[in-house]
Image (tube, rainbow, N blue to C red):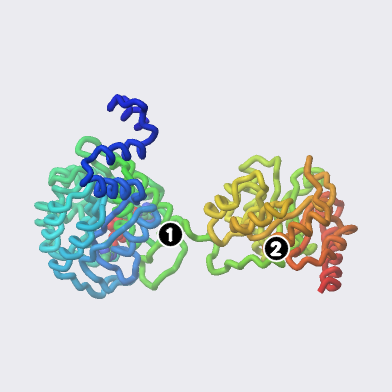
């Protein structure tokens, strides 16, 4: 689009091929002595991938639930770079604030200059500002180095009730900081203080407060109702000078709300830095806070009444219990059960019963391969099977469906050559999940290792009815694949009690086990057949060793 537009605008012939072409022409048409500097500038702009940047000017919370630490985590979680100017150091925990040491204003000014003179900051967010002079220094710096937006969280009183900035700060807030703010985000106590102590107890009170605070000069106001007494929902009131918008979310039942205000303000700043309009920025930020609280409602950090929450919940690999994560051991591939919805239907069993019995019979890992299942049903089954597997200390993998694996927090996935590439799956699932990939050739086996898979499924070793048009690689093909890769391999395809021994007797060190579908699930008794398979494998293990 841009290229067409420029071509027409400059009526050039031949047309510009790309922005890079246009830039080359611009550089070449400059006087010789300016070309080098111009070329360098153009190169810098082309090469630098800009990341949105928020500068937070706030206090440090030693307990790391609020303040600078919350801002850093929130921005990281929202994919935005965050630089930090520290205005005060607090000795603080979940019980309350034990001490405050304000940073001298000259040093706040020095930090501001260091960041703003060097880095391209998109949005500034302010939090705890413990002295009048610090507020003055910030307003001065913003005049010298203007930014796209200013988010002011007028921090005065923490959730614990401790005072972070006294009433002497109110005049300078009203006279200098609020009038240049794009949004100001007081909680109920702060809104009341800014308005000379009015009582705020209802959503209507919050509306009037938002209007009165808007009259002080900020372009938008968000009065936060986290502390609204007797409110079932978490209600905030947004006012843009014309319209009031009530933002509601269900209230998460948790004590872990320390730092919600700081997090909300820095998340708003993060969205603005990405280019969002104000209302969407506020909506996304509120949703993020709610989700973070929901994901952290049961964590216990500290002995006080209001604990911190987990801003980076998305990075967690095991939502249920991060302490109980157990790693993938290639020997888990020993007797690998792959489910089949058709077979379970034929024998009148639920997938959960089939999985439970397979584990009782000796299956060491389970893959859910529900080709015909609808997504909702698949997810339901996956969650139930995951609970069973977890109870027995057996990993659960999902065939093909990365979305289902993510939704039920399965231990990993098994994918084929025509599914999503392993490297992309790794990015989606994170570094700890298990990724298995089907390979038939040495080239595919080498690639699987390079791409970061954890194991290879190789087959069909024997002809099978489970897959149509499936090329049989035979024992020779299996051996070639094993030798071509450093990854552990599990053999699959037509393997049963009668031939499992020949497979394992190949004796290649990285061939760790066999995967079966029909021999386990297309049988009258899953328990008996699995036990038989297990026994055969145990015998060959003894012989091979
Ligand atoms: N239990 C909760 N469930 C859902 N959202 C909540 C909950 N508590 C607070 N919020 C939301 O979090 C945001 C911050 O609001 P709050 O009124 O707690 O700010 P604050 O008092 O300045 O926070 P803090 O002083 O702890 O940093 C608001 O959007 C509010 O609605
Ligand atoms: C440093 C700091 N800033 C802000 C808050 C508000 O929660 C806090 N408790 N501590
Ligand atoms: Mg609060």
Q: Is mark 1 within 8 Å of ligand 1?
A: no
Q: Is residue 453 above or below residue 14?
A: below
Looking at the image, which residue sits at the far front?
32
Mark nearer the viewer, 1 or 2: 2
Residue 223 shows up from this direction:
no
Question: Which quadrant of the figure has residue 279?
Answer: top left
Q: Is residue 335 above or below residue 464?
A: below
| Percent x, y of residue 24 | 32, 40
Q: In the image, is 120 to the left or to the right of 466?
A: left
| Percent x, y of residue 317 | 53, 60
Residue 81 shows up from this direction:
yes
Q: Is residue 393 above or below residue 21?
A: below
Name the residue located 83 percent from the left edge and 64 percent from the top edge.
506
What is the quadrant of the N terminus in the image? top left
Question: Which quadrant of the figure has residue 362?
Answer: bottom right
Residues 535 and 392: in front is: 535
Residues 2 and 104: in front is: 2
Name the residue located 27 percent from the left edge and 67 percent from the top edge.
60
| Percent x, y of residue 256 | 39, 62
Q: Residues within 10 Å of mark 2 (few under 14, many from 20)?
A: many
Check disc 1 and report its element: helix, strand or loop. Answer: loop
Q: In the image, is 382 to the left or to the right of 524?
A: left
Name the residue located 67 percent from the left edge and 64 percent from the top edge.
486
Check disc 2 and report its element: helix, strand or loop. Answer: loop
**Alpha carbon distance from label 1 to label 2:** 32 Å
| Percent x, y of residue 509 | 75, 68
Residues 323 and 427: in front is: 427
Judging by the rendered image, the residue that carries numbered circle 1 is: 312
Q: Which mark is residue 488?
A: 2
């Amino acid at each position: 689009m841009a290229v067409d537009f420029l071509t027409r605008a400059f009526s050039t012939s031949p047309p510009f091929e790309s922005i890079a072409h246009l830039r080359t022409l611009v550089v070449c048409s400059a006087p010789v002595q300016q070309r080098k500097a111009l070329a360098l500038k153009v190169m810098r702009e082309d090469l630098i991938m800009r990341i949105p940047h928020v500068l937070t000017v706030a206090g440090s919370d030693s307990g790391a639930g609020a303040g600078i630490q919350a801002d850093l985590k929130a921005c990281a979680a929202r994919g935005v770079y965050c630089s930090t100017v520290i205005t005060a150091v607090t000795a603080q925990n979940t019980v309350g604030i034990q001490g405050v040491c304000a940073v001298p204003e000259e040093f706040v000014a020095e930090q501001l200059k260091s960041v703003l003179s060097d880095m391209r900051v998109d949005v500034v967010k302010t939090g705890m500002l413990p002295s009048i002079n610090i507020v003055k220094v910030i307003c001065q710096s913003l005049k010298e180095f203007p930014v796209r937006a200013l988010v002011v969280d007028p921090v005065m009183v923490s959730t614990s009730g401790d005072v972070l900035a006294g009433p002497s700060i109110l005049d300078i807030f009203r006279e200098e900081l609020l009038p240049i703010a794009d949004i100001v985000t007081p909680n109920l106590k702060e809104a009341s203080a800014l308005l000379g102590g009015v009582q705020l107890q209802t959503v209507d009170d919050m509306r009037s407060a938002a209007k009165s605070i808007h009259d002080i000069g900020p372009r938008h106001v968000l009065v936060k109702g986290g502390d609204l007494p007797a409110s079932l929902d978490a209600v905030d009131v947004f006012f843009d000078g014309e319209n009031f918008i009530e933002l509601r979310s269900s209230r998460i039942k948790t004590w872990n709300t320390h730092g919600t205000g700081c997090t909300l303000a820095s998340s708003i700043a993060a969205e603005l830095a990405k280019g969002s309009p104000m209302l969407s920025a506020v909506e996304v930020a509120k949703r993020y806070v709610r989700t973070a609280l929901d994901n952290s409602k049961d964590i216990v950090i500290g002995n006080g009444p209001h604990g911190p929450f987990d801003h980076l919940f998305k990075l967690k690999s095991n939502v249920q219990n991060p302490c109980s994560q157990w790693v993938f051991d290639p020997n888990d591939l020993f007797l690998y059960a792959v489910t089949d919805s058709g077979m379970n239907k034929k024998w009148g069993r639920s997938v959960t019963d089939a999985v439970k019995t397979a584990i009782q019979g000796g299956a060491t890992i389970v893959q859910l391969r529900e080709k015909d299942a609808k997504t909702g049903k698949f997810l339901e089954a996956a969650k139930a099977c995951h609970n069973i597997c977890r109870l027995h200390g057996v990993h659960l993998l999902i065939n093909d469906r990365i979305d289902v694996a993510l939704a039920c927090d399965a231990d990993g996935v098994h994918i084929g050559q025509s599914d999503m590439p392993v490297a992309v799956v790794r990015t989606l699932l994170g570094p700890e999940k298990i990724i298995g990939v089907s390979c038939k050739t040495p080239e595919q086996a080498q690639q699987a290792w390079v791409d970061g898979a954890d194991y290879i499924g190789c087959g069909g070793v024997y002809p099978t009815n489970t897959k149509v048009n499936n090329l049989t690689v035979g024992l020779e093909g299996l051996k070639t694949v094993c030798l071509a890769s450093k990854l552990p391999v599990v053999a699959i395809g037509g393997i049963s009690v009668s031939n499992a021994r020949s497979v394992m007797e190949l004796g290649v060190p990285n061939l760790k086990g066999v995967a079966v579908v029909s021999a386990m699930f297309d049988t009258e008794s899953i328990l008996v057949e699995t036990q038989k398979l297990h026994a055969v494998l145990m015998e060959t293990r003894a012989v091979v060793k």
